[in-house]
C-alpha cells in the first residue's frame, strides 16, 4: 500500500513539473518581455522573469507538502458504516452519530483526514492552475498566431512584434477573464474536496 502511495506521489510531482516546465516555455515564446502576463502579482510588482521563477518555486514549495499530506502521510480508517453520512461522521469525529451542525461548522477531531482533504484540494488547484496557463499560452502560439497570419497582411516577424509590444491592433485576446479564472479554480477545489471524501467512502465500502 505504501509503495502504491509513493508511486501516486511521484506521478503527481512529475505531472506538476511537466506542466510547469512546458508552461514556462510557452510563456517565454508567447511573451518574452512578459507584457501579456495577466497575473496580478506580475502586473503590480513586475521584476520580470526573476519574479516568474520565484512565484513558480513558491507554488512548487506549496505543492510538495500538500501532495505529501494527501498521498503519503494520510492513513485510511477501516470501519463498517451504513451510509455516506455515517462514514463522514466516523472519519472526522470518530462517532457515527455526529450532528449535521457539528459536521458542517465544527472542528474535526481527526486532523489527519482534515489535512489530507485540504492538501488534496490545494494540490488539484495548483495542477489546474498549471494546466490552464499551459493551454492559454498554447492557444496564443498555435491558434491565434496562425489565424493572424492568414487573416492579416502581416509577416510572421510583424505578428511576433505585435506580441511583445503594446499597444497593438493584433494584440492577443485574453482567453479567460480574472473572474472566469478564479471561478474555474474554485470549481476545481470544490470538486477535489468532494471527490476525495467520496473516494475514501468507496474504498472503505469495498474493504468492509
Image: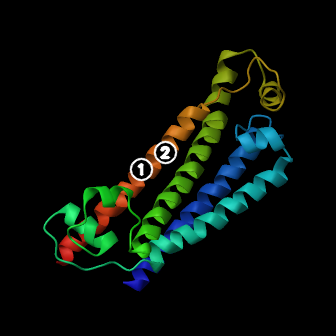
Position of the N terminus, as image quadrant, is bottom left
Asked if the residue under mark 1 is in contact with the one under mark 2, i.e. CB atoms within 8 Å, the reply is yes
Give above or below for 97 relative to 150: below
* Label 2 – label 1 distance at C-alpha: 6 Å
* Image position of 84 (left or right of 123): left
Which residue has dot 1 on it? Answer: 190
* Image position of 97 (left or right of 114): left
Q: Give the color scheme: rainbow, by chain, secondary structure or one colour.
A: rainbow
Circle 1: element type:
helix
Query: Along the line of sight, which residue is nearer the eye, 19 or 201?
Result: 201
Residue 87 in picture, x, y percent from top left:
23, 68
Q: Residue at x 71, y 15 (%)?
A: 152
Residue 200, label in figure: none
Q: Residue at x 38, y 80 (%)?
A: 75
Which residue has dot 2 on it? Answer: 186
Residue 206 in picture, x, y percent from top left:
19, 73
Most extreme residue toward the left is: 82
Amino acid at each position: 500500500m505504501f509503495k502504491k502511495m509513493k508511486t501516486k506521489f511521484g506521478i503527481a510531482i512529475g505531472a506538476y513539473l511537466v506542466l510547469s516546465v512546458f508552461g514556462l516555455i510557452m510563456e517565454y515564446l508567447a511573451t518574452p518581455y512578459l507584457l501579456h502576463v495577466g497575473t496580478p502579482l506580475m502586473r503590480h510588482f513586475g521584476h520580470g522573469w526573476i519574479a516568474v521563477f520565484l512565484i513558480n518555486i513558491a507554488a512548487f514549495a506549496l505543492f510538495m507538502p500538500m501532495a505529501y499530506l494527501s498521498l503519503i502521510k494520510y492513513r485510511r480508517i477501516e470501519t463498517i458504516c451504513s451510509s455516506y453520512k455515517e462514514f463522514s461522521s466516523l472519519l472526522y469525529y470518530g462517532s457515527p452519530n455526529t450532528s449535521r451542525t457539528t459536521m458542517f461548522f465544527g472542528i474535526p477531531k481527526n486532523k489527519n483526514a482534515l489535512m489530507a482533504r485540504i492538501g488534496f484540494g490545494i494540490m488539484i488547484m495548483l495542477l489546474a492552475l498549471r494546466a490552464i496557463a499551459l493551454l492559454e499560452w498554447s492557444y496564443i502560439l498555435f491558434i491565434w498566431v496562425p489565424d493572424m497570419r492568414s487573416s492579416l497582411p502581416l509577416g510572421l516577424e510583424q505578428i511576433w512584434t505585435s506580441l511583445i509590444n503594446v499597444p497593438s491592433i493584433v494584440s492577443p485576446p485574453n482567453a479567460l477573464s480574472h473572474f472566469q479564472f478564479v471561478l474555474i479554480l474554485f470549481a476545481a477545489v470544490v470538486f477535489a474536496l468532494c471527490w476525495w471524501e467520496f473516494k475514501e467512502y468507496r474504498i472503505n465500502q469495498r474493504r468492509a
